[in-house]
Amino acid sequence: MNTIIQNILVFITLGFALTFLIRKFVLKKKSKKACGTDDCGCH
């Protein structure tokens, strides 16, 4: 019984970790302003 609960907790933790990493590195929001490529007046 104890190992079943432990396995469930491990899979839940793994799911949260993978979700965090995918959101942080794969689904990055693209910057709409890229300074230097358009005339934004920052230089």
Image (tube, grey):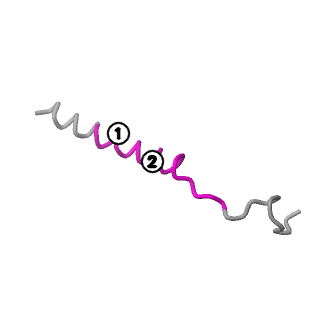
Q: Position of residue 36 (x, y in %)?
A: 82, 58
Secondary structure mostly seen in the magenta stretch:
helix
Q: Which label number is shown at residue 32?
A: none
For image coordinates 54% across by 46% down, the residue present is 25
Give percent across and percent down for residue 19: 41, 47
Q: Position of residue 3 (x, y in %)?
A: 17, 30
Query: On the picture, is 30 further left or further right than 9?
Result: right
Where residue 11 sits, quadrant-wise, is top left
Q: Residue furthest left?
A: 1
Query: Which residue matches tag 1?
Result: 14
Start-end of magenta stretch: 11-31
The picture quadrant where one finds residue 2 is top left
Q: Residue at x 58, y 58 (%)?
A: 29
The residue lying toward the viewer, choosing from 29 and 12, is: 29
What is the secondary structure assignment of the residue under circle 2? helix
Q: Quadrant of the N terminus?
A: top left
Residue to which mark 2 is pinned: 20
Please, which residue is most extreme toward the right here?
Answer: 43
Quadrant in the picture for the C terminus: bottom right
Depth check: give the residue in front, 29 or 15. Answer: 29
Q: Secondary structure at mark 1?
A: helix
Is 18 situated above or below 43? Answer: above
Q: Residues within 10 Å of mark 1 (few under 14, many from 20)?
A: few
Query: Going 41% across and 42% down the picture, which residue do you hit?
Result: 18
> Front-most of 3 and 28?
28
Q: Amino acid at mark 1?
A: Leu
